[in-house]
Image: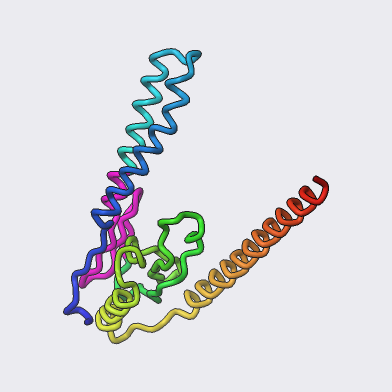
Amino acid sequence: MGARALPREYRIKPGRTAVLIGAVGLGSLAALMPVWTDESIVGWVKLLVTGLLLAFFGWLVMAARRCATSVDLKGVRVRTMVRTRRVAWEDVQDIRAVPNPSAHMAANAPKVIAYVYDTAGRRVQLMYVDDLHVAVDREIAAIRAAWTELRGEDWEPSAQAQRRIERRDRRESRAFLALAWFSGLVFLGLIVFLVILFAGA
């Protein structure tokens, strides 16, 4: 544990890359089918749309493979599809795993994801530090141990950052609760509608 466990790198699993490529391939076919079957669209437009769509999906696959989280003696670096963020150990305010609020939106979405929080209270998601790729509790413990060792003896928590983190947590909790209530009301409304429909029939 601690600095001796570094460096650590987290990337998409090869098996999940194959799933991503398959999903992108099917998505490309589904998106291109209406274009190629519509006889009112001229040939050059079909070729242009096909080229642009294939280029976009190709970029999507390559970008997903480039995404990574790297943890070394200097800090945490997260490379997303569009940018790279680095948080030095002395600027880290917290590292934690949390339930993924979007887990219900896709069957293969992780249920637990992880964030690092900086001195401004901003958070950066640790790409692929989730329950689909690693044992999250073990990896968070290893990263936190390195942080505790490498952040410096004069490190102190920022009260302002903690307030911002807590405010965001409260906002997200309220939003999640509101979404849960809304989903429940929609489901209840659907049941009432079906009862009325079948009772009338």
Q: Position of residue 139 (x, y in %)?
A: 29, 74
Task: Tell which of 119 and 41 is nearer to you.
Answer: 41
Vertical relation: 178 (above or below) 82: below
Residue found 32% across the figure and 43% down from its top: 22
Magenta part of the protein: which range? 61-86
Return the residue found at the far left. 4
Q: Position of residue 41 (x, y in %)?
A: 47, 15
| Residue 197 is covered by the magenta coloring | no
Picture quadrant of residue 55: top left
Location of residue 107 in the rendering, given as x and y in whole percent from the top left corner: 44, 56
The picture places residue 45, in percent across and down from the top left corner, at: 42, 18
Identity of the residue drawn at 22% across and 82% down: 1
Residue at 49%, 80% in the rendered image = 159
Q: On the picture, is 201 further left or further right than 43?
A: right
Residue reaching furthest bottom? 153
Q: Quadrant of the C terminus?
A: top right
**Seen in the image, is 151 located left or right of residue 123?**
left
Q: Quadrant of residue 168?
A: bottom right
Q: Quadrant of residue 146?
A: bottom left
Tally of numbered tags: 0
From the viewer's perspective, is residue 168 above or below residue 147? Answer: above
Whether 83 is among the magenta residues is yes
Decide which of 171, 98 is in the foreground and name it.
Answer: 98
Q: For this rendering, which residue is in front, 58 or 32?
A: 32
